[in-house]
């Protein structure tokens, strides 16, 4: 038996155990989240002196690289020359009661399907999927208002209207469109979030939704009536 | 006569050195391969944002669709971080004076943007296009993970070139019907092989591996 000096064994043992630390550290880093900026080892051309969408910039006081549009700018094709299309009102200032002429050749079922999808994204959060004003955001806001110690953090919430409310149901499609674009009372306008075609699709779907909750048997096509359940 | 003699144990030095010489390069290769990988360095990046916005609350509990805020995702390459106005749609009424919303109030007053910290950052030479993916069957959850469970968003996928190419070479397992695009809980296993194939042909999916697909 060769006798190796004890110190050498210890040093070797310590070095070998040190080698175990990196694998455990790597495993730990992989399995946990960290708030620290990621270590960047291969820089390549990852950071280039250019701006991508919504990038910050020190050049401007507001820190935006993308410059806000100068007020009054009209992009090509975005001039509001057709009040029916852009505001939902006819030439003589009444609410439009029909879809704008731009939808003449559009498949109406596809339009309503699009409207349903958009409604469920942007409107149902407050108005609810069926339009009764029971969306999840509205419910949470109501719960805050009913808080035993008073509404927290100055919460003040006007309940979202039911779209089947007697004051809402008779509204013409143009007025619904206008409300989607500009908002009404405490509801914010969605003109910047929803493009004009989708606003009309939503307005059309809202009219269909209102009809669906206020329909008689005569409104159902005869060949579909058999499939309806008696209440 | 005293003459220095190497002790007997020194005979072990050569085999030990050979062993170390064999192990250390392997160790170094593995260390770089695993330690420098984006899966280690980038995944899990969870910066503190100027507003402690909870996706878990908004997208999870309240069930808000991703597109309510990230509304450009279907039309543009960039899934926009919403402007302050989108937050104010609700927060003019809900908890307007909450201390957590300090940065939001400041932004609404001054008109300066909230300085959100980008979590999913690509190299500046890569041009990912959201609209090309989400409109053709790649769901949000595939690359972003269960955002609806994240109190604070962290990076879920490595977003490395190899990771992109994995899917570009074999996209079939990551395709879903476009109606389920933002559905975080859609069961991908519920699609049969035929349904996936038909999605692939429906959307004419032939993912390119050309350099210029992503790099310009």
Image (cartoon, coloured by chain):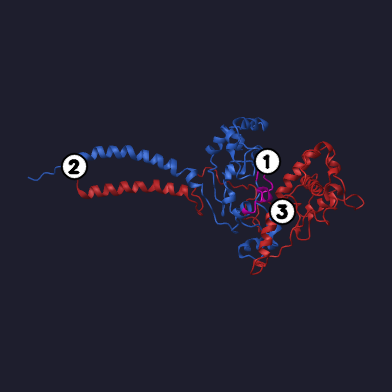
Chain colours: A red, B blue
Figure check: A148 above or below A194: below
The answer to whether tags 1 and 2 share a subunit is yes
Q: How dense is the environment of label 2, judged by Cα within 10 Å: few (below 14), some, or many (20 and up)?
A: few
At a point 43% along the width and 42% down the height, the residue shown is: B32
Q: Nearer the viewer, residue A221 or A114?
A: A221
Q: State the residue position of label 2.
A: B9
Q: Callout 3: few (<14), some (14-19), or many (20+) C-alpha neighbours within 10 Å?
A: few
Q: Residues within 10 Å of mark 1 (few under 14, many from 20)?
A: few
Report, in whole angstroms, how far the alpha carbon at label 3 lies from the one at label 1. Answer: 33 Å
Q: Chain of mark 1?
A: B
- Return the x and y of residue A170 as percentages of the image width and height: 85, 53
Q: Quadrant of residue A117?
A: top right
Q: Which mark is residue A68?
A: 3
Q: Name the quadrant containing residue A140.
A: bottom right
Inter-mark Cα distance, 3 to 2? 77 Å
Q: Is residue B76 magenta?
A: yes
Query: From the viewer's perspective, is the residue at label 3 or at label 2 nearer?
Result: 2
In the depicted view, which residue is nearer to us: A79 or B189? B189
Give yes or no for contact between labels 1 and 2 (Cβ–Cβ under 8 Å).
Answer: no
Chain letter belonging to callout 2:
B
The lab-note entry on whether marks 3 and 2 share a chain reads no
| Residue drawn at x 62%, y 30% as measured from the top left | B194
Q: Which residue is mark 1?
A: B179
Question: Which stretch is magenta?
Answer: B61-78
Q: Secondary structure under badge 2?
A: helix
């Amino acid at each position: 038996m060769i006798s190796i000096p004890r110190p050498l064994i210890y040093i070797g043992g310590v070095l070998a155990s040190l080698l175990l630390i990196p694998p455990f550290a790597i495993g730990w880093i992989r399995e946990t989240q960290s708030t620290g900026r990621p270590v960047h080892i291969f820089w390549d051309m990852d950071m280039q002196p250019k701006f991508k969408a919504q990038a910050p910039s020190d050049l401007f006081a507001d820190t935006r690289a993308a410059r806000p549009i100068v007020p009054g700018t009209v992009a090509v094709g975005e001039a509001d020359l057709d009040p029916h299309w852009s505001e939902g009102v006819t030439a003589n200032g009444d609410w439009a009661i029909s879809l704008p002429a731009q939808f003449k050749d559009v498949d109406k079922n596809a339009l309503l399907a699009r409207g349903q999808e958009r409604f469920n994204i942007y409107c149902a959060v407050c108005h609810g999927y069926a339009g009764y004003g029971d969306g999840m955001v509205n419910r949470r806001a109501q719960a805050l208002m009913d808080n035993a110690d008073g509404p927290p953090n100055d919460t003040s919430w006007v309940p979202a209207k039911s779209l089947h409310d007697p004051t809402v149901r008779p509204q013409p499609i143009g007025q619904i469109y206008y409300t989607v674009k500009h908002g009404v009372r405490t509801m914010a306008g969605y003109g910047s979030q929803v493009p004009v075609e989708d606003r009309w699709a939503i307005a059309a779907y809202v009219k269909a939704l209102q009809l669906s909750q206020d329909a008689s048997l005569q409104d159902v096509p005869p060949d579909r009536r058999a499939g309806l359940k008696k209440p | 006569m005293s003459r220095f003699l190497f002790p007997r144990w020194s005979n072990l030095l050569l085999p030990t050195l050979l062993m170390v010489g064999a192990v250390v390069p392997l160790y170094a290769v593995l260390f770089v391969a695993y330690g420098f990988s984006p899966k280690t360095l980038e995944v899990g990046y969870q910066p503190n944002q100027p507003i402690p916005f909870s996706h878990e609350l908004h997208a999870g509990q309240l069930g808000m669709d991703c597109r309510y805020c990230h509304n450009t995702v279907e039309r543009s390459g960039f899934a926009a971080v919403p402007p302050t106005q989108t937050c104010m749609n609700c927060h003019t009424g809900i908890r307007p004076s909450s201390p957590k919303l300090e940065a939001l109030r400041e932004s609404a007053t001054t008109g300066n943007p909230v300085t959100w910290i980008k979590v999913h950052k690509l190299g500046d030479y890569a041009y990912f296009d959201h609209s090309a993916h989400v409109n053709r069957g790649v769901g949000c959850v595939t690359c972003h993970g269960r955002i609806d469970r994240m109190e604070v968003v962290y990076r879920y996928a490595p977003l490395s070139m190899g990771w992109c190419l994995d899917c570009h070479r074999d996209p079939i397992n990551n395709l879903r019907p476009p109606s389920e695009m933002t559905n975080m809980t859609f069961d991908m296993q519920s699609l049969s092989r035929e349904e996936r194939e038909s999605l692939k042909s429906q959307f004419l999916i032939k993912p390119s591996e050309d350099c210029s697909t992503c790099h310009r």
